[in-house]
Structures are given as structure tokens and as C-alpha cells.
Image: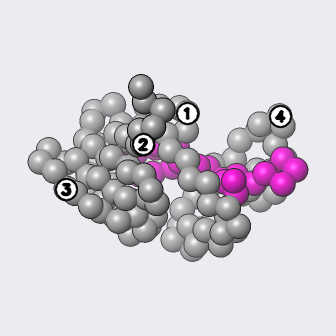
């Protein structure tokens, strides 16, 4: 039923203006639609990311969206850091932390938050 349909990340925010700056300028996503009520739709590769205003923004304590960026992982992490993105540091038992990067064999990952505290993730897969 849904196997051949694209899915999208849906992220709640409290401040749509701050989110627009973060997702557009900091992350470089392309805004493709701005709807009434503060709904922003971004294009990210072949998928869409929906950002919308909600009083419950930032209450999820788990990853909200993930980008597998392949070989560009190091460059993207460095670019985010140059834009003052602060990375999260977790004590995952199977991942060794090397600075801001979590590593397990050839797998590398980094987590960071948007202005509302939503957890976002990039990895080298």
C-alpha cells in the first residue's frame, strides 16, 4: 500500500521565522512552498521536509530527521560547524566519540538540534 510512496519528515517548531532561517540558510534546504498558518515545505534531495508551527515543538527526545550524505559527511559537518551549529554528544555503547563525530567501524554520524530542540542527524551512509 505505501511501499512505493515517498515519505517525508514532519518537524514541529514554535518560531517559524527562526526555523525558516535555520532550515533555509543554515542547512541550505530549498523552500518550495510556504503555506498559510506557518507551514514551510522544503525540498531535500528526492524528499520533502515539512516544518509547521506547534506548541509541542521540541518535545521529541529522539531523532526527527536523518540525512545520509555519503562521502561528503566530513565536509558537511565542517560546514555546519562553521555556521555555529552545536553538535550533540551521546554515550551510545556501540559508538566511539571522536570530537563531534560518533564512529562505529566505517559508520560515522553526528547529531545536532534546530532552534526548537528537534534532533537532526547526518551520517556517512
Q: Quadrant of residue 5?
A: top left
| Mark 2 crowd level (few <14, some 14–19, many ≥20, 10 Å Cα) | few
Mark 3 touches mark 1? (CB < 8 Å): no
* Closer to the eye: label 3 or 1: 3
Q: Nearer the viewer, mark 2 or mark 3?
A: 2
On the image, the x and y values in percent for residue 114 come to 45, 51
Q: CA distance from mark 4 to mark 2?
A: 32 Å
Residue at the disc numbered 4: 93
* Circle 4/circle 2 CB separation < 8 Å: no
Compared with 121, 74 (above or below) is below
Whether residue 112 is visible here, answered yes or no, is no
Between the C-alphas of marks 3 and 4, the distance is 41 Å
Give how far apart the Cα atoms at labels 3 and 1 are. 26 Å
Label 4: element kind: loop
Quadrant into which the N terminus falls: top left
> Which residue is identified by label 1?
62
31 sits to left or right of 2: left
- Residue at the disc numbered 3: 34
Of residues 46 and 62, the one nearer the viewer is 46
First in sequence: mark 2 vs mark 1: 2
What is the secondary structure assignment of the residue under circle 1? loop
Q: Residues within 10 Å of mark 3 (few under 14, many from 20)?
A: some
Q: Secondary structure at mark 2?
A: loop
Nearest the viewer among 4 and 98 is 4
Amino acid at each position: 500500500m505505501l511501499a512505493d510512496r515517498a515519505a517525508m519528515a514532519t518537524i514541529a517548531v514554535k518560531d517559524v521565522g527562526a526555523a525558516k532561517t535555520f532550515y533555509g540558510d543554515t542547512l541550505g534546504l530549498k523552500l518550495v512552498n510556504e503555506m498559510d498558518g506557518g507551514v514551510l515545505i522544503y525540498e531535500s534531495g528526492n524528499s520533502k521536509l515539512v516544518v509547521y508551527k506547534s506548541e509541542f515543538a521540541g518535545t521529541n527526545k529522539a531523532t526527527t530527521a536523518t540525512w545520509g550524505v555519503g562521502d561528503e559527511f566530513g565536509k558537511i559537518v565542517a560546514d555546519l560547524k562553521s555556521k555555529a551549529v552545536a553538535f550533540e554528544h551521546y554515550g551510545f555503547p556501540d559508538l566511539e566519540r571522536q570530537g563531534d563525530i560518533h564512529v562505529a567501524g566505517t559508520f560515522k554520524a553526528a547529531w545536532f538540534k534546530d532552534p526548537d530542540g528537534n534532533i537532526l542527524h547526518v551520517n556517512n551512509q
